Image (spheres, rainbow, N blue to C red):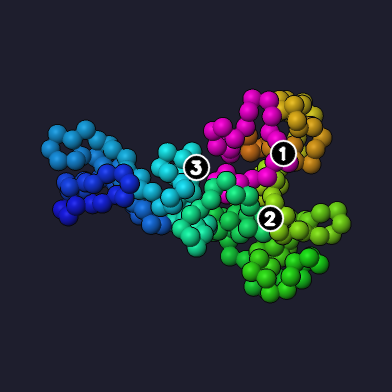
Amino acid sequence: DQPLELPGVVRIVAPLVGRHRRAGNHIVAAIDNVEQGGQGPILGLAQTFPDVPIDHPHAEHIEDLVSIGAVQGHPDGTFRPSDSVNRAEFLKIAYRVAGIEPSDTATGCFPDVVSGAWYEEYVCDAAERRFVQGYNDGLFRPERTISRAEGTKISLEVLGISSPTLQEKDLLGLGFIDVSPYSWYARYLHRASSLGFYPPGFLTETTFQPDVPLTRGET
């Protein structure tokens, strides 16, 4: 019956009579009734990062990732949702979301994956599982910004979602003017789109922009 403070949102002084959970440094509450005669449910989402307001299009998903330890803020307390993500960072996030623990014996997979680097076990475990194959020159480029196409493939692979080879008619029906039906990522895009994988506003009606870097917020 103590007052519940939701920073930046609302101060609830009535008993919390509903579903609520703590995620990271915030509380999400679906309140079925506030005092007598309340009109529930009411949703309260407290802001964790000063640069991710509660009306940010990716706020809820960012908070969920924080709650499971998949992402964290910067030392200054910000999240910087518009910053880019590199390939090693994205792979670690995908592993955390999928609940996969990389093998600590996975080493020496690519010549540019530094021995003892924080990302070595993630990259080398992913290579052993065939989640990633690297580039044609044999490098992985862990610090290279990850693109939308690469992020789509890695996400599906790590989450165990199959992306079977498609018939030509299916590939031609993708409908994106910037995606060749014969590109290496076309089947992953088709699969992800069919599952509603992408958040609202990520795709336009005619473009995917496969080479555009993913941001922290989009990730």
Q: Helix, strand, or loop for circle 1?
A: loop
> Would residue 150 be counted in the magenta stretch?
no
Q: Residue at horizontal 46%, vertical 46%?
A: 52
- Considering only vertical position in the picture, is 71 above or below 119? above
> Mark 2 = which residue?
87
The amino acid on which the numbered mark 1 sits, given as a three-letter code, is Pro
Q: Helix, strand, or loop for circle 3?
A: loop
The amino acid on which the numbered mark 3 sits, given as a three-letter code, is His
Q: Is residue 80 left or right of residue 213?
A: left
> Would residue 208 be counted in the magenta stretch?
yes
Q: Residue furthest right?
A: 137
> Mark 1 = which residue?
210
Q: Where does residue 55 sit, x and y in percent of width and height?
A: 42, 38
Of mark 3 and mark 2, the one earlier in the sequence is 3
Specify the segment rendered in magenta.
196-219
Q: Is residue 136 left or right of residue 113?
A: right
**Spatial separation of the CA atoms under disc 3 and disc 1:** 20 Å
- The answer to whether residue 130 of the structure is visible from this angle is no
Residue 58 has which mark? 3
The reply to whether discs 3 and 2 touch (Cβ–Cβ < 8 Å) is no
How many neighbours does mark 3 have within 10 angstroms: few (below 14), some (14-19), or many (20 or more)?
Answer: some
Q: Where does residue 212 sit, x and y in percent of width and height?
A: 70, 41
Of mark 2 and mark 1, the one earlier in the sequence is 2
Q: Helix, strand, or loop for circle 2?
A: helix
Q: Is residue 69 left or right of residue 195?
A: left
**Spatial separation of the CA atoms under disc 2 and disc 1:** 15 Å
The amino acid on which the numbered mark 2 sits, given as a three-letter code, is Arg
Q: Residue at horizontal 62%, vertical 32%?
A: 203
Secondary structure, magenta segment, majority class:
loop
How many neighbours does mark 2 have within 10 angstroms: few (below 14), some (14-19), or many (20 or more)?
Answer: many
Q: Quadrant of residue 122?
A: bottom right
